[in-house]
Image (tube, grey):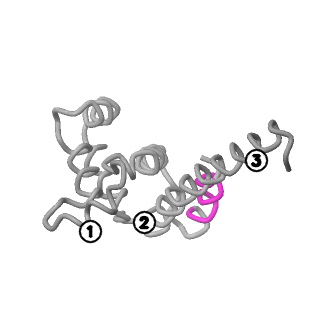
Amino acid sequence: ARFLARVEPLAAAMGSPLSAVDHDDALAAALLHDLGHGPLSHLFEEVFPGMHAHELWTSAAILDPDTEVHRALAAAEPEMPSRVERLVHGVHPMPLLARAVMEMSRSSERSWDKLDEDRELLKRLEAGGN
């Protein structure tokens, strides 16, 4: 959300202020971008020919009306699932917003990586190491 807050003034300066819908769609897309990502999915995608890429599983989960994800998004606004699914793939009428979502997605990956590093540091400190 902080990253999106930095994007909002840029979008406004470019003559395309973010609407509340844009804001909600961007946050949902950033949170759901790896929904279809299973354990070792990159490896399995390479080893098993014809296996669907995790991005396709993400799209399916967002667009399938039988999933809880779709129902939650559609409850907020009926067209939200399709907008969020496109935004997950970097497609939006406002390229700046599409890029912001991609950056938020990368940022969340780095945050989780950093969290793992922090846990390792805490373990070493608790064990008396540095």
Mark 2 closeness class: few <14, some 14–19, many ≥20 residues within 10 Å: some
> Of tags 3 and 2, which is closer to the observer?
3
The amino acid sitting under disc 3 is: Leu
Assess disc 3: are there few (<14), some (14-19) or many (≥20) residues with their C-alpha within 10 Å of its C-alpha: some
- Badge 1 marks a residue whose secondary structure is helix
Picture coordinates of residue 5, whole percent (x, y): 63, 52
Question: In the rendered structure, which amino acid carries the disc numbered 2?
Answer: Met
The residue located at (78%, 44%) in the rendering is 124
Closer to the N terminus: mark 1 or mark 2? 1
The residue that mark 3 highlights is 121
Q: Which residues are magenta?
A: 3-11
Helix, strand or loop at disc 3?
helix
Tag 2's secondary structure? loop
Mark 2 = which residue? 94
**At which x and y percent is residue 66?**
16, 32
The amino acid type found where label 1 is placed reads: Glu
Separation (CA) of disc 1 from disc 2 = 33 Å
How far from the left and from the top, in percent, is residue 15? Answer: 53, 67
| Residue visible at 51% across and 54% down in the picture | 18
Question: Disc number at residue 46?
Answer: 1
Count the marks: 3
Closer-to-camera residue (90/97): 90
Residue 68 in the image: state x and y as whole percent.
Answer: 27, 30
Give yes or no for residue 6 being in the magenta stretch: yes
Marks 1 and 2: which is nearer the front? Answer: 1
